[in-house]
Amino acid sequence: MRLRHSLSVLRAAAFVVCGVLSALPVGAADSPKEADAERLLALRKEALSYEHGEGVAKDGARAAKLYCDGARLGDAEAQYSLGWMYANGRGVDRNDALAAYFFGLAAKQGHAQSQKMQRFVGEASSEVPECMRPPAIPEEPAEVIRPTSEAQKKVIALVNQLAPQYGVSPRLALAVIRTESNFNAAALSNKNAQGLMQLIPDTSARFNVKQPLDPEQNIRGGLAYLRWLLAYFEGDVSLVAAAYNAGEGAVNRYRGVPPYAETRGYVKRIVGLFQREDHPYDRKVTSPSPELQKIRLTKGS
């Protein structure tokens, strides 16, 4: 009981005293650049709200995930907060080895409270925690990738080659291609959407696609857009699919999947083919949607 009281006091003091992010490298996580500080602070605040149930339902597992996202990006405060959660069993199972791991990361950046906490929790885990590892891209389901022609085989091979370069699951890209053009590289919609991934002119220009009917350029443009949307909507496949169909502005405006029959059908089709509701994403690509927290609250209500 005395140890838990000491831990709580130390942690409370840390939020008052230690708010500076260092620029020293830390093993598994690179230190954040000064330009990223505001973004990391927003991520940490969201984690804190789920940890304490402030404005949202209390959710320790989600808080830990958000703290770990920050820890992976090198945020010493997030590393410390996650270490504290594991040290106290707050919202997660108590694990002193994991606590020591995260305190160790922050301590190497000069985080004073983490340095003090190390003596309470013993040796750090020798393994990198799962949430600190690069996200794995899911396997492709057969119904999405089964080719019915030589042309489709070539498209599938190209997607399997290119998608990992963009951090996008080939099966998500193939789900979009199946739904958008049914593998027709010459497809042209009445809104002038072109090619396999049906890029409209604005999207082609945005992602530097000069020849949208060229299969490789078209796929690269579509993958670049998917990568951006995944970061913008933090891996929520329904929101990504809705934005690909109707635009991210519509998703923000309606705070979720817009009430268009076409878009809702599109989202159902993509999620059904992809067979997952979430997808790994790279936070460095872009800042998340400013409406994302409100969208989550709406979905949870």
Image (cartoon, helix red, strand yellow):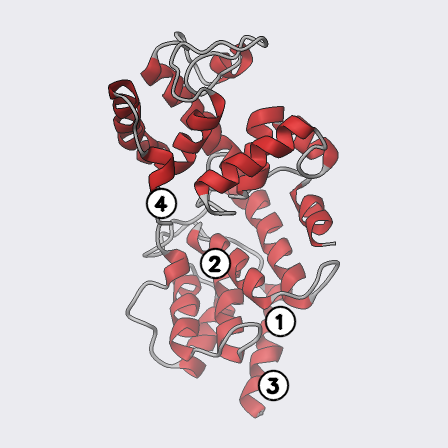
Label 1's element?
Answer: helix
Tell me the tag on residue 68. 2
- Other-residue count near label 2 (Cα within 10 Å), few / some / many at <14 / 14–19 / ≥20: many
Residue kind at label 3, given as amino acid type: His
Marks 3 and 1, the one that precedes in the sequence:
3
- Other-residue count near label 1 (Cα within 10 Å), few / some / many at <14 / 14–19 / ≥20: few
From the image, tell me which residue sits under label 4.
137
Label 3's element?
Answer: helix
- In this rendering, is residue 134 above or below 35? below
For the residues labelled 2 and 1, the Cα–Cα distance comes to 21 Å
Q: Quick one: quadrant of the N terminus? A: bottom right
The percent position of residue 150, horizontal first and vertical second, equals: 24, 20
Residue kind at label 4, given as amino acid type: Ile
Residue at image location 54% in from the left, 56% down from the top: 66
Q: Quadrant of residue 157?
A: top left
- Other-residue count near label 3 (Cα within 10 Å), few / some / many at <14 / 14–19 / ≥20: few
From the image, state whether disc 4 or disc 3 is nearer to you: 4
Q: Is residue 169 visible?
A: no
Q: Is residue 74 visible?
A: yes
